[in-house]
Amino acid sequence: MTDLIQTITVFALPVIFAITLHEAAHGYVARLFGDPTATLAGRVTLNPIAHIDPVGTILVPLGMLLTSKLLGGPPLLFGWAKPVPVDFGRLRKPKQDMLWVALAGPAANLLMAVMWAITIRFVLETGLGRDSFLFQVAAVGIQINLVLMALNLFPLLPLDGGRILFSLLPHQLAWQYGRLEPYGMVILIVLLLTGSLWVLIEPFMALGRWIVRLFL
């Protein structure tokens, strides 16, 4: 039980920062391109309470951490926040601007992974050591943000990667691709349960790790 509490303590701060910046970035960029929906809803904020989903942000990650502890494996984490409301029709160029709104979330996670990497460098240079609480939090912060970045870049609607792909496809192909969105979460869950998802997002993870290593 003590180990579980320690694990939750280490994971809590990086997870809260990761989801908060990810969601706020979507809303902020949407506002830049003409859609104030998220701003009017109070979602362009660094207050994590505005973005927390009781099930996806708390219950599911806690359940996965508890399960991994009981099974004796490494800590696993999966979850989601409340999606930021974006009215793509209010963007100045809806299809083109969708790319930047969607890309903002994963970009925010990559930026945070880099900031956690700089934190690790600071910890090591000041002699705090790898056993320090700050080092453990920063290491988890890198992993959490890279996973969120890679997962959201996966080209499956309604994930950010799906929005990016929709924006880049020619109009006819884009609308045909968009018809798959109602089945996207089912497909994602199947990929997750079969273990295929981690294989498919590994190229994005590898790119993220390469960028992070530049700052270590």
Image: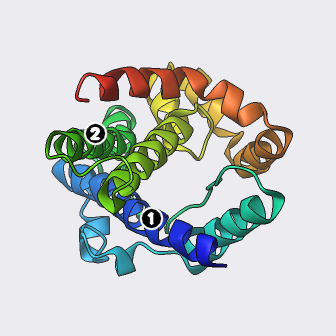
The residue lying at 31 percent from left, 67 percent from top is 38
Instruction: Confirm whether residue 83 shows in the render.
Output: no
The disc labelled 2 sits on which kind of residue?
Ala
Q: Residue placed at 70% from the left, 26% from the top?
A: 199
Compared across the picture, whether 62 is left or right of 85 comes to right
Mark sitting on residue 117: 2
Number of numbered callouts drawn: 2
Q: Is residue 41 above or below residue 64?
A: below
Q: Residue 66: x and y, percent?
A: 71, 69
Q: Amino acid at mark 1?
A: Val
Q: Quadrant of the N terminus?
A: bottom right
Q: How is the image coloured?
A: rainbow
**Vertical side of 102 occupied by 203: above or below:** above
Badge 2 density bin: few <14, some 14–19, many ≥20, Cα 10 Å: many
Q: Work out whether mark 1 precedes mark 2 in sequence or the reverse, and give the earlier one.
A: 1
Nearer to us in this view, 175 or 201: 201
| Residue drawn at x 30%, y 58% as measured from the top left | 134
Residue 187 location, x and y as percent? Answer: 78, 42
Spatial CA distance of label 1 from label 2 is 16 Å
Q: Secondary structure at mark 2?
A: helix
Q: Disc 1 marks which residue?
A: 10
Query: In the rendered view, does 212 fall on the left or right side of 78?
Result: left
Quadrant occupied by the C terminus: top left
Q: Find residue 198 and report its horizontal and vertical position in percent.
A: 68, 33
- CB contact under 8 Å: marks 1 and 2: no
